[in-house]
Amino acid sequence: MEPKKRRILGFALLILLVLVFLLWNLHAGSVSISAGEIRQILLGRGQDSTKWNIIRSIRLPRLLSALILGGALSVSGYLLQTFFHNPIAGPFVLGISSGAKLTVSVTMIFLLSRGLVSSSATLILSAFLGAMLSMGFVLLISQKVKQMSLLVVCGVMIGYICSALTDFLVTFADDSNIVNLHNWSVGSFSGRTWTDVRAMAIVCALGILLSFLLSKPIRAYQMGEVYAQNMGVNLKAFRAALILLSSILSACVTAFAGPISFVGIAVPHLMKSLFKTAEPMILIPASFLGGGAFCLMCDLIARTAFAPTEVSISSVTAVFGAPVVIYMMVRRKAARE
Amino acid sequence: MSEFLKTENLSVGYDGRALIRDVCLRVQRGKIVTLIGPNGSGKSTILKTIVGQLSKVSGTVLLEEKDMAQMRQNETARRMAILMTQRVHPELMTCFDVVSTGRYPYTGALGLLSREDKSIVMEAMALVNSEDLADRPFDAISDGQRQRILLARALCQQPEIIVLDEPTSYLDIRYKLELLTILKTMVREKNLAVLMSLHELELAERVSDTVVCVSGDRIDRMGSPKEIFSSDYIAKLYHMEPGKYDPCFDTLEYVPKV
């Protein structure tokens, strides 16, 4: 297919998927709401009904969280893959999400024990701190270990250590609110307020916009460091920018939805296969839309598949995402031999 | 004719320790200067330092009498293009995409290619006889084609000098000759300056205007191919003894010193 046609069709497909899953998410749940009713409610009619409440204060913020955070997570993965010149890099497998999870739970428990509820900004900041700490470790290790597979193993180990510490904290924390904390620490889009949605929208929009503005150096960097430098890319500043942006994005996701597995690797890969390019100007918006659609789909399954019991979002994304990652690793190995 | 690229008392090495001192190279436009020397003698180290991949230990690199260290990155990018030994594995890029990265110093903030940029890219591909490869994925073509594409990439950067580090490695003899022929034509037509390193002495002899012999810790000798290749000097440079009978190959040839 001609590249231009492929791009138009690709984006049309992604937008369609996002819309379909948005509506489906509005419709489905413990109370099923018909398309007509959704339309009325979105137009602002029938303000006193229960359904109004369900849509306005539960489903809408939740699906917007899934869309924004899923998109941010995929973009973060794409940036990390660019940084490491390897498609198997992602915030979850490198332990960055788990690092953020640890610092966020420490912050939450600390504040809860003083009877305070953590604000959106505090959550994002503490998650960013954790993400940068894990990132620092990963970068230190990557100085010694050049092989990506070993780096991923190290990242998974960092992830386990952080998760173990978090579980330990959660188990022994003494508060009734701990139920929420438990939900969050396994990954979930539930319980987000409009304040949270506003905060994540601002942070993610900024992060993704800045990433998009890096399109030109990202393209040069895909040719390898040596050529990028010769073309006039300031390598140090560029690398730092990549690390900061990907950490901010994945930290924001972890702050609001806990650790979500495999989206960061699987979605950019699917987008590369769909568009047959790794060009940042295509891949950044595509990853955002694709990640959004993917997480909306997974959240729908998490909410409805075993209703009334809710499955953690990470379990669902793993079921769909992990096979993609395994397939990629096998194919890469085969291509090299 | 004035020198386009000049190094003055340049010392190169790793981690601030000089391996080769007092490198004084002169490259003129329209001329090819080739570094030769045994493996590990420091040819690549010199080239990597000149292109800025390695930081120099001391000394200066001048482009038209201007210190390169003082120049803005974008300016050096417009004047100097490179083709290095390391293989590149850009993900999902067509040959056109790879060549078009050479337009980087000329495009705007988002790196969008104008119509003019695109025609320059196609022109560069035509110069290396590779227009038909434009839509092929870069990782699906042969090594010889890849080097040609990378040369087109360098040309479309519209440089005044190209630095090439062993551009003929991995290539069979036909592609070696082809690449160097294209290079030689470019030098003449575009009045380019070329600084490169080569493994193959017979090729160095054929294409170079000046040959520079690097021997581990210093630039040992510099001169026209005639001066360098017509004596026993090469044997000395490569630590071999001249004119002995080699029983292994049944020839009267240079043999390695044991």
Image (tube, coloured by chain):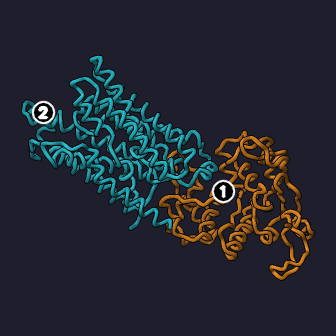
Chain colours: A cyan, B orange
Residue B228's spot in the image, x, y percent?
89, 65
One can see residue A34 in this view: yes
Residue at screen point 52% across, 41% down? A139
- Give the amino acid type for the residue marked by disc 2 in the picture: Asn
Task: State the quadrant of the C terminus of chain B.
Answer: bottom right
Left or right of A63, for residue A166? right
Question: Which one is nearer the viewer's eye here, A100 or B257?
Answer: B257
Taking A259 as reference, is B195 left or right? right
Determine if marks 1 and 2 fall on one subunit. Answer: no
Residue type beneath disc 1: Gln
Number of labelled discs?
2
User: In the depicted view, which residue is nearer to us: B29 or A105?
Assistant: A105
Horizontal and vertical percent position of residue B94? 50, 63
Q: In the figure, residue B71 lies in which quadrant? A: top right
Residue labelled with disc 2: A53
Mark 1–mark 2 distance (CA, rounded to whole Å): 63 Å
For this view, does B38 lie left or right of residue B159? right
Q: Residue furthest bottom?
A: B250
Which mark, residue A65? none
Residue A255: image quadrant is: top left
Q: Secondary structure at mark 1?
A: loop
User: Is any atom of residue B123 visible in this view?
Assistant: no
The residue under label 1 is B158
Who is closer to the viewer here, B217 or B93? Answer: B217
* Residue name at image x 36 percent, y 37 percent: A163
Q: Tell me what residue is drawn at x 79 percent, y 41 percent.
A: B58
Mark 2 lies on a secondary structure that is helix
